[in-house]
Amino acid sequence: MKRSQLLALVLCLGLCRIQACQDKAEAASVSKDWWETAQFYQIYPRSFMDSDGDGIGDLNGITSKLEYLKDIGVTAAWLSPIFTSPMADFGYDISDFFDIQPEYGTLDDFRALIKKANELDLKIILDFVPNHSSDENVWFQKSVKREKGYEDFYVWHDGKLNAETGEREPPSNWLSIFRGGAWEWNEERQQYYLHQFVIKQPDLNYRNPAVVEQMKRVLRYWLNEGVAGFRCDALPVLFEVEPDENGQYPDEAVSGQTDDKDNRIYLKTEFVENQPETIDMVYQWRQVMDDHKRIYGGESRILLIETYAVPEFSMQFFGNRTVEGAHLPFNFNLITELANNGVSASSIKTAVYNWLSNLPAGRTSNWVIGNHDQRRAASRYGVANTDAMNMLVMVLPGASVTYQGEELGMTDGVISWEDTVDPAACNSNKDIFEQFTRDPSRTPFQWTDGTNAGFSTGAKTWLPLADDYKTANVQTESSEARSHLKVYKAMVALRKESKTLQYGSIKYAALSDDVFVVKRFLAGSPSIVYVANIGSSTATVDLSTFDVSLPESLALKVSNVASTKTENSNLKITGLSLAAGEALVLSTT
């Protein structure tokens, strides 16, 4: 073979190898599952839309507004609990895991919701509450009576006798998340039961195989009804440490965080949270999801996991080399880090770094800035930073999660002690309840500037409206030339059309304590740059100091509602002036 022919062959093989790599990369990009770049939207059903005028949101109300979710680009809606409940904790105390709370509707109403969602190509995800039931659940009532098969369905204990007084006392000093002791005496059974939440929420005993199987039945039941997956509630407390050889539970040590002896954080939680058995249980639930797909076909059914723990624990929920776990353990870093260390670019950088640097290879990120247990995002980060934070979670890689109203910039409602209904607050007193209440973020969704914000035709809503409903509502923001809602929709649209945002790599930095910048880049596609000033004064930045490969100017794709810059204009990356709260998403073309 001549040298020229050999060279040509080598070049051909090299080009083929390059093409093969390109094909492989393209195949990898198109193989992402639906949830990996999804826009999740949390609905708190009691507050979303009331269809029958009783002042309480319901399933038919949600169904009537599914077109709105489709319009703003939602992939999947996650519903907080809708199951039969005496409402001691507004649905998180479930008396029947297989039926619908009557004030929310019926099973037929739920099936109608699923049918409409399917027609709109929207997915529905349910809240799975595995840690506890209501004390009105038939399982608990049977357990109280020690009926066969239910004797150890819950965590029961005889307690211990005080050596000095001879009186019976709780098994340990453990505290409830909703204040006070975590053990309650049951007179009929003559034993204490564990309740990590309110007294009416007894903890299920996951060391009993019958409980494990029963809760898998719950998952299968709703999968058969057509849901796309589950958000799993309160995973940190699913297991508690096993009793010692004498059948006794250990006391928690004092944490030193507070002098309030009824407050959960008065004690450490070494024995009642984040036990290793919890991780294996998630792996078992994932098998239920995968088995359903294997048997019935269709798209992946997914698990979203609520977990608050150090990264080395939380990341195990993803799975390992031999077993799959949760699709998305929720990432609350943008909530917790900024709450602990203040709203700043430095805190955002730390939040992003602590997640991405610990993320196992091949796993998908997700970004959350609010939920029904937190004060509203606009109230925590500042109204001026509403768009900056919504834009950020859609620029970062992976899935993003929106809590209802964040797209509008809804702020906390002002709820008096007299109007407070959240048990976390009601279990305190009128002097300190505001430290614990979650009611302000659960006020009715704001559809219009009219009566009851268009949420209900009733004379009274279950919680008072937030004060900003006249301006922060769907009707008003849809008609305005610029609004938080329109910024949100523009970002969702960009995210869905941009391969860079879906598949690209990331680089990020805090240019100062006020300015945070992100670059997403992908070979063959325009790079996307996010820059935001979350401070209280104007800042001038030079993006070339962040990335020398950036061109002299970038095209403006999306800007926050208060920005005066013209979209689609080219902006120089040096001497770029950002007003307080200004956030920009720019592109290399």
Image: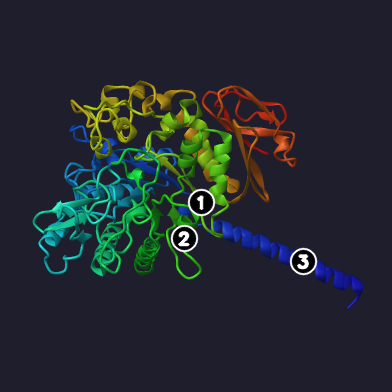
Answer with left or right where residue 577 lies relative to residue 9.
left
Identity of the amino acid at label 2?
Gln
Identity of the amino acid at label 1?
Ser
Which residue is nearer to you in this view: 105 or 466?
Answer: 466
Which comes sooner in the sequence, label 2 or label 1? 2
Q: Quadrant of the C terminus?
A: top right
Q: In this figure, which residue is indicated by the disc labeled 1?
A: 365
What percent of the width, then of the height, locates residue 325?
43, 62
Res 232 seen here: no
Q: Quadrant of the N terminus?
A: bottom right
Instruction: Say which residue appears at 51% left-offset and 33% top-offset.
Output: 343
Question: On residue 483, which mark appears?
Answer: none
Q: Secondary structure at mark 2?
A: helix
Answer with left or right where residue 453 lies relative to residue 166.
right
Task: Describe the colour scheme in one phrase.
Answer: rainbow
Q: CA distance from mark 2 to mark 1?
A: 14 Å
Res 107 seen here: yes
Instruction: Say which residue appears at 51% left-offset and 36% top-offset.
Output: 341
Q: Nearer the viewer, mark 2 or mark 3?
A: 2
What percent of the width, then of the height, locates residue 519?
63, 42
**Label 1 Cα crowd, 10 Å radius (few <14 / some 14-19 / many 20+):** many
Q: CA distance from mark 2 to mark 3?
A: 40 Å
Question: On residue 14, which mark appears?
Answer: 3
What percent of the width, then of the height, locates residue 297?
38, 65
Q: Nearer the viewer, mark 2 or mark 1?
A: 2
Residue 303, placed above or below residue 456: below
The extreme bottom residue here reads 1
Q: In this figure, which residue is indicated by the disc labeled 2?
A: 316
**Label 2 Cα crowd, 10 Å radius (few <14 / some 14-19 / many 20+):** many
Q: CA distance from mark 3 to mark 1?
A: 34 Å
What percent of the width, then of the height, locates residue 566?
61, 25
